[in-house]
Image (cartoon, rainbow, N blue to C red):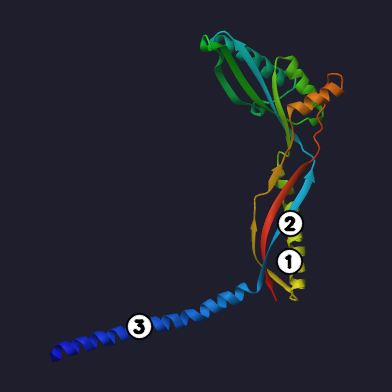
Amino acid sequence: MKNWVKSFGSVLLAGSLIMGGIGLSGAFKGPEKAFAEDVQKNIVNVVGKGELSIKPDIVYLSIGVDTSAATAQEAQKSNGAKITKLTTLFKTTWAIADKDIQSTQFYVQPNYSYSEKEGQQIKGYNAHHTLQIAYRDLSKVGALLDAASAAGANNIGNARFSVEDSSAFEAQVINKAMANADVKAGAIATAAKRSLGQVVTVTQSDVSNNPVYYDNMKMESAAADNAGGTTVQPGEVKLTTVLSVTYELK
């Protein structure tokens, strides 16, 4: 009986030590939590936006050929001949390099018709091949499209104007975004009757190059207004970035 009481007392003592350890651990964690909350009360987060308008220096043109024939082989062969003619035109007459001519879409598929009597029937095949052309002489884009059309291109998509290398302008657009963040943070600090301290953290979203698109309907309209000569205006490209900035408040 005495041995049982002694063991039970040891258990009680061990339990007390464990509970005491938990209490001490909580006591040490208290100041850390309070310190974190205090830091959070003395910062301000803002988002700064930067934008820069730049003249584009390259255009990406979608130029393709659609060909229909009785068989898939005939459609593909005829379409291939037209694409070869276009590619030769781009390389020889317009001095477009191989690296700037890329096939982006190709398929051969059946054309179907339906009637109550015959149901669904295959009525020939259609071959489609699209090229993406990178071109840098923006003053001749309309003439290039007209030449492609005359050479057999019957599926001309959009013209996407862009900046080929935007890295040269990144510093400028980042400075604009940071200046915008400074103004916002300064206004918030003044409204809160505080002063703005140093920058604590900065996170940048990727610099985006927002191209200008012209679709085929707009280009056709321009052609009608110029007696058959297509005119496409490159306009300006917007380079943008976003900075998430955390400032210290004093």
Query: Which residue is depicted at the point 73% across and 19% down?
Result: 148
Query: Which residue is depicted at the point 81% across and 37% down?
Result: 235
Across and down, in percent, residue 110 comes to 54, 15
Name the residue type under label 1: Ala
Disc marking residue 177: 2
- Earlier in the chain: of badge 1 and badge 2, it is 2
Marks 3 and 2: in contact by CB < 8 Å?
A: no
Front residue of 31 and 145: 31
Name the residue type under label 3: Met
In the rendered image, the residue lying farthest to the right is: 226
- Disc 1 from disc 2: Cα separation: 12 Å
Marks 2 and 1: in contact by CB < 8 Å?
A: no
- Disc 2 from disc 3: Cα separation: 54 Å
Find numbered disc 2 in the image and state the secondary structure of the residue it sits on.
Answer: helix
Please identify the quarter of the rendering in which residue 76 is found. Answer: top right
Query: Which residue is depicted at the point 58% across and 22% down?
Result: 106
Find numbered disc 1 in the image and state the secondary structure of the residue it sits on.
Answer: helix
Please identify the quarter of the rendering in which residue 65 is found. Answer: top right
Q: Residues within 10 Å of mark 3 (few under 14, many from 20)?
A: few
Find numbered disc 3 in the image and state the secondary structure of the residue it sits on.
Answer: helix
- Quadrant of the drawing holding the C terminus: bottom right
Q: Residues within 10 Å of mark 2 (few under 14, many from 20)?
A: many
The image shows residue 168, relative to residue 59, as above or below, that is below
- The residue wearing badge 3 is 19
Disc marking residue 185: 1
Across and down, in percent, residue 114 comes to 55, 14
Name the residue type under label 2: Ala
Indicate which label's residue lies in the foreground, 2 or 3. 3
- Quadrant of the drawing holding the N terminus: bottom left
